[in-house]
Amino acid sequence: MRKLFGTDGIRGVANIYPMTTEIAMQVGRAIAFVVKNKKGRHRIVIGKDTRASGYMIENALAAGICSMGVDVLLVGPLPTPGIAFITTSMRADAGVVISASHNPFQDNGIKIFSHDGFKLPDSVEADIEDLIFSQKMAALRPVAEEVGRATRIDDAKGRYTVFLKHIFPKKRTLEDMHIVLDCAHGATYGVAPNVFEELGAKVTALGVSPDGKNINHNCGALYPQLMAEKVKETGADIGIALDGDGDRLIVCDEFGKVVDGDHLMAICAKDLMKKRKLRKKTLVTTVMSNMGLELAMKEMGGKMIRTQVGDRYVVEAMRKNGYSFGGEQSGHLVFLDHITTGDGNLAALQLLGIMRKRGKTVSQLAKVMTSYPQVLNNVRTSSKIDLENFTDFQKAVKKMEKKLGKKGRILVRASGTEPVIRVMVEGESKKTIQTMADELGEMIAKA
């Protein structure tokens, strides 16, 4: 059983276990211990989003790392993929992101990248937990000149901005394009508007005034309605919504209709297929992706494989099997030919490049796939429920699956980032699947 790490690092309410300064300091010490595998000085990058609690977690992590004789490079608020980029660009030994991604401001989290910019595998996270709880590091106390130092990297945003602009086709610009951009008052507020404006777009920016408490609050990728309404109000060409740490993207078309990650993957996969850059003609996504995406890939002459939920598992499957593109319905899109993790800004630039090249609008491009009706119920729980041994619930699921046949499916799973059971039902009839999802949700809530 994991004690600290979930599907995307450590996460919880800030200043309550496990997201305490005491644990953060021990995590810092453990990361430093793990990376000290050669002679000489070692360096670890620390970045964060805009949550008020980021300051105390940042200082605790830095203290723990320095106490083990490793130097710290502080980059301040920067998107998660930006921290992965800086880690590899500066040849650091690891990168740490202080963020709870799409969670509300009172939560916070710690995600760790290896020196190559990829998230740590489960086995290394288990090693870090063992180091913390076994007290193996207790006697290790570097002194004098062996103690680590912390340095602030002031131009990290500029470096990441230049990297993103180089991704966009060099012969094209965004001139005459109007973009509504919602940064969710998160880590992208100081980067994203500059990227699109410097490429020539007119940008109507939302969610760019973080106060430490408004991150993800009724804005960004989780609440795209704000972006969509502004697109309709201003007549913009596209709406782009990012989440708090900038690793996911949701857009809306010129009519204000929201376009999710599945449609974005279909659009990008088709473009990559035409350029012969979709390795093995395969798209990697998760069990949450719509059946319509799978059908669209078959029509293109490609195929789709699924992993468990979590962009890290998508990336692991891509690396293991030599694939180049994958993502999640929630908007994590991973272009391994460019970066090691999901990047909302980079994904938006890929989409905009396709729009420019083909001279088409988002609504026209989105016709590449037709979604099956899908209902997702999130049932908040006060304690852990053993769904496998919940006999009546399992019988109900099997009965519903039999009714849906091959034209639908049911997926029930516990969230790895919050105390929630997610019930997803997919099928041809919206009314039928809504009834099924509601019934299963009620059974969990009563339990």
Image (cartoon, rainbow, N blue to C red):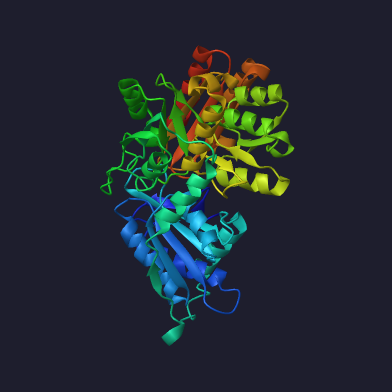
Residue 106 locus on image (x, y percent): 32, 48
Asked if residue 405 is positioned above or below residue 294 in the image, the reply reads: above
Residue that protrudes farthest toward the bottom in the picture: 144
- Single out the residue that lies furthest toward the front: 171
Front residue of 214 and 117: 117
Nearest the eye: 105 or 227 = 227
| Residue 190 drawn above or below residue 207 | below
Residue 336 percent coordinates (x, y): 61, 46
- Whether residue 47 is visible, yes or no, is yes
Is 132 located above or below residue 16 in the figure?
below
Observer-nearest of 195 and 370: 195
Q: Write the residue at 67% across / 48% down.
A: 319
Instruction: Give the tally of numbered discs.
Output: 0
Which quarter of the picture shows residue 267?
A: top right
**Picture quadrant of residue 150:** bottom left
Residue 220 locus on image (x, y percent) = 37, 36
- Of 173 and 107, which appears nearest the observer? 173
Spot occupied by residue 144 in the image (x, y as percentages of width and height) = 42, 87
Q: Quadrant of the N terminus?
A: bottom right
Res 18 visible: no
